[in-house]
Amino acid sequence: MKKYFFLFISIFLLSCASKKQQSFSALCPEILFSKDHRIYIATEENSLTLNNISYKAVINNYKFPSECFMINNKVEATLSILFTITPDKAKLADIIIPYYIALLDDQKNIVNIQYYKATGTLKKNDDKYFYVETEIRTTQNVTIPVQDMNVDLNKKLLLGFMLNQDKLKILN
């Protein structure tokens, strides 16, 4: 009986001594859309003009399909983003949409920025002649280091498209 008691105590002490990853549920950050980078345009030509835009993409919506967690001094979240693509003069079905997710501080300054791309295929109409408006959903795992956030974990994420100066000039 004593052998079993010592065996039980040994197993209990060993299981308490192992280091486990601790996590707890955290509030998901508020999401903002960049007003200057909410629309994306692309062309299949060498240079972009108002007359050769292949498609236009808009950040339509987002959601957190699961809870956000604090793990090892990082907030981890899964973010689902919905893009609406409107074809204009598209000849190719495959599209690539570069976007960013930026962490903002209380004064709305960018503290941390991460870059991603969504890919998809434009849908055709029933006759298979023309491309039609298409929705693309992408799911992105986002990790935010706690040192990039203020003490009360009041955090905001900014979504936007990566746009060069030529695209910004045409959009504005």
Image: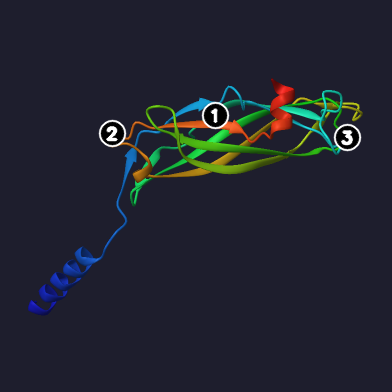
Measure the C-alpha gap from mark 1 to mark 2: 24 Å
The percent position of residue 102, horizontal first and vertical second, equals: 50, 36
Residue 74, position in %: x, y?
A: 37, 47
- Which residue is painted at 48% across and 43% down in the image? 142
- Disc 1 marks which amino acid? Tyr
Tag 1 and tag 3, C-beta contact below 8 Å: no
The mark that comes first in sequence, 1 or 3, is 1
Q: Nearer the viewer, mark 1 or mark 2?
A: 2
Residue holding disc 1:
62
Q: Which one is nearer the viewer's eye here, 162 or 168?
A: 168
Above or below for 22 versus 122: below
Q: Residues within 10 Å of mark 3 (few under 14, many from 20)?
A: some
Q: Residues within 10 Å of mark 1 (few under 14, many from 20)?
A: some
- The residue that disc 2 covers is 152
Question: What percent of the width, then of the height, locates residue 10?
Answer: 16, 73
In three-dimensional space, the C-alpha distance between marks 1 and 3, rounded to whole angstroms, equals 29 Å
Task: Say whether disc 1 or disc 2 marks the residue closer to the N-terminus.
Answer: 1
Mark number displayed over residue 91: 3
Contact between marks 1 and 2 (CB within 8 A): the answer is: no
Hey, what amino acid is under mark 2? Asp
Which quadrant holds residue 60? top right
Farthest-out residue, bottom:
3
The structure residue drawn at horizontal position 10% and vertical position 73%, both measured from the top left corner, is 5
Would you place residue 3 above or below residue 120 in this image?
Answer: below
Q: Are marks 3 and 2 in contact (CB under 8 Å)?
A: no
Q: 147 or 56, which lies in front?
A: 147
Q: Could you tell whether 79 is left or right of 131 in the image?
A: left
> Is disc 3 placed on a helix, strand or loop?
loop
